[in-house]
Image (cartoon, coloured by chain):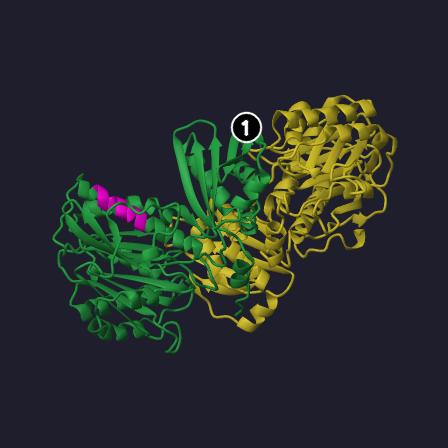
Chain colours: A yellow, B green
Amino acid sequence: MSESFFTSRWVSRPPGLLDCAAIPAGFRFAALAAGVKGPTPAGLDVGLIVAEPAGTVSAVRFCDSGVLAAPVVVTRERCDPHGLRAVVANSGNANAATGEAGLEQAVAVQEAAAAALGLDPREVAVASTGVIGVPLPGGRIAAALPALAGALGVDPLGFAHAIRTTDVLDKHVALELELPSGSVRIAAQCKGAGMISPRFATMLCFVQTDVALDAQTAELLLGASVKRSFDRISVDGQLSTNDTVILMASGASGVRIERESEDELRLGEALDALLRQLALRIVADGEGARRIGCVRVRGAGEETVARVARGVANSPLVKAALFGGDPNWGRVAQAIGAATAGRAPLRFDIAIEGVSVARDGAAAEHDAAALAAAVARDEVLYEIELEGTGAEAELFFSDLSYDYVKINAEYTT
Amino acid sequence: MSESFFTSRWVSRPPGLLDCAAIPAGFRFAALAAGVKGPTPAGLDVGLIVAEPAGTVSAVRFCDSGVLAAPVVVTRERCDPHGLRAVVANSGNANAATGEAGLEQAVAVQEAAAAALGLDPREVAVASTGVIGVPLPGGRIAAALPALAGALGVDPLGFAHAIRTTDVLDKHVALELELPSGSVRIAAQCKGAGMISPRFATMLCFVQTDVALDAQTAELLLGASVKRSFDRISVDGQLSTNDTVILMASGASGVRIERESEDELRLGEALDALLRQLALRIVADGEGARRIGCVRVRGAGEETVARVARGVANSPLVKAALFGGDPNWGRVAQAIGAATAGRAPLRFDIAIEGVSVARDGAAAEHDAAALAAAVARDEVLYEIELEGTGAEAELFFSDLSYDYVKINAEYTT
């Protein structure tokens, strides 16, 4: 998979970032079928990541839903965010909207993993994805943990499969990065096709590297990369209850990243490209998706450009037009207006795939045939200029297709 | 059509409000094919309403898009909102995102109507619906106005057809209302299937009555009714550029509505029921819609309950489940969480069609077969209880169907 990992024209492979068959030093993975998705052999549904070095440094990001899943609450409130040594993740059940019992199940999984690995529970993160509102069979996961701990190895493929729900595209990779101070490795396993799919939800992303990092740098690098990747995508505008991103740095390569060094800059570039490509793959894997759109909005006011970008990306009219290969800028104009309610008259320019279709709020003459051909490709760029300058927002989004409706309507209880 | 006008279980026909074949006294209507939709005989596309009594009182509401259509701008800025005597409305072209030229076209139509009717341009409202971003052929409409003025009569049917775009269901009615002070009539012509359809947009609603009203009462009654009807619907969450609602009271019945009288109360009830039923008909006519959902949210904080209601009503996951007849409360829980970001842990109860499916944020045992049968009907009620009391929000919404995608994707330029 690595050869074609950087497939989007919106992500450049940074210099010195190479495909690699091996995982970062200091990490081990395991996965098995514990019966969460259903009676075995329903497939792999529990995975384990362990960072062996005691000095491993981590950083974490969660979604901020008002209805947070139990594993998010437990990891957020009972773990040391910078001292994570292990992750237990399951698919088949989100353990969301499960009340006190759900919290107890998540804690039981965390404690069983800590016992099996000889770690403090504060060092063990838990993550879940799957059906909302159904009690998690935490006992099955806890019972599987000794076997998982005994099966740890260097192949992350089983783990990557164990966290998938409706994902179709692969979202895992191992990379090698040439830094001024030496060669290091980065790996990631990610899942997500939207908040989304018949009662399944959630994006999860686990990133490992063998550089040595301090906690503040880990926070900084992960925060900046998430803002430019997972914070900028929308399949259907639906915030999940379970989203979790965890970066772990084992230090096992012997390369230490000093603050404000060339190493830090290059590592940041690599992490940025990695997470952006994974985020774009989630969008491309959006349920039923045929095309990816990218909307870029420039003008005055951070809040305004962000709201307009989100309004365009989440507009079912814009998304249906993207699916249909219809360069219909009237729908983009409508979405701009809806996102700027009360502020008429608003001046705006719209370009689709570099073709100026509206200028100063009205139609601009253009080559319709050339534009129609351009919007029939896999990735379509919408550029919007509002009044003023200084702010810019970017969002990636999938289209709205028959299959999205089919996938989300034809599940019946 | 009147016999079955109040078809929704969410609207009660107020006592004394009867079906009626005749329009309110003092009004005249006309319509013709002026070639806006395309070369005749593409169908009726321009309509005219005239209130004959000089003392007619009116009230108006518009959408607040940042990209307002030219007719909205012209009616808002060049008319006396309480002294409207005529409305010229066209379908086939929204005159939105058309710049200065669009404003000039709207003014030309307004002035041609004033000249043909012997009115001041400030007494003539203009309204448009149709394709966005294409110059309005205002000259064709202006040229048709003498013929329209000559064709004025008591049948509103042609007008009701002239303002339709993708509408399938009728949205016009004539009613008689028995007030303590005498019998009066109310009529309305409405269009709308969402902001929505291949480059077509907009809801328009024109209401006539022959009561005598002062301007302040007209404002009050229209404002309250719009808040409980057109402000509470969503087909696809997409704000239009052209929405316009106009109430005109001719006074020709001789019944004067005094402030804070029983007459005012009863007229308000009638207007409320009328606009709610029209709004529900717009939702039922939402492109591709099979079912209508109603979400009611109770708890503390007007802003919170409104945001949760809108989040549920606009969630493509909830809407696809509604289409599929799937009583999937996990999606409702997800939408609640997304609308209350940063406020976890949030306690909530959910009932679907009166069946309690979640209590205190977790699953409640219920009769799944009975619930499945209930959500297969045409109207589905979602009730959400959040923490606290004092605030309540209600929204009506259509489902998300294959046909919505088809209608909005298969148009290609």
Q: Is residue A4 visible?
A: yes
The residue wearing badge 1 is B360
* Vertical arrangement, residue B247 with respect to residue B394, above or below: below
Where is residue A359 shown, x and y percent of the image?
Answer: 45, 62
Q: Quadrant of residue B30?
A: bottom left
Where is residue A167 shown, x and y percent of the image?
Answer: 71, 48
- Which residue is at a point 14% across and 55% down the rendered structure image? B253
Tell me which chain the residue with mark 1 is part of.
Answer: B
Position of the N terminus of chain B, as image quadrant, is bottom left
- The amino acid type of the residue labelled 1 equals Asp
Left/right of residue A120 with respect to residue B139 in the rendered view? right
* Vertical arrangement, residue B119 with respect to residue B397, above or below: below
Q: Is residue B65 visible?
A: no
- Which residue is at a point 81% across and 37% down the rendered structure image? A31
Q: Is residue B268 magenta?
A: yes
Q: Which residues are magenta?
A: B265-274
Label 1 secondary element: loop
Crowd around label 1: few <14 · some 14–19 · many ≥20 (10 Å): some
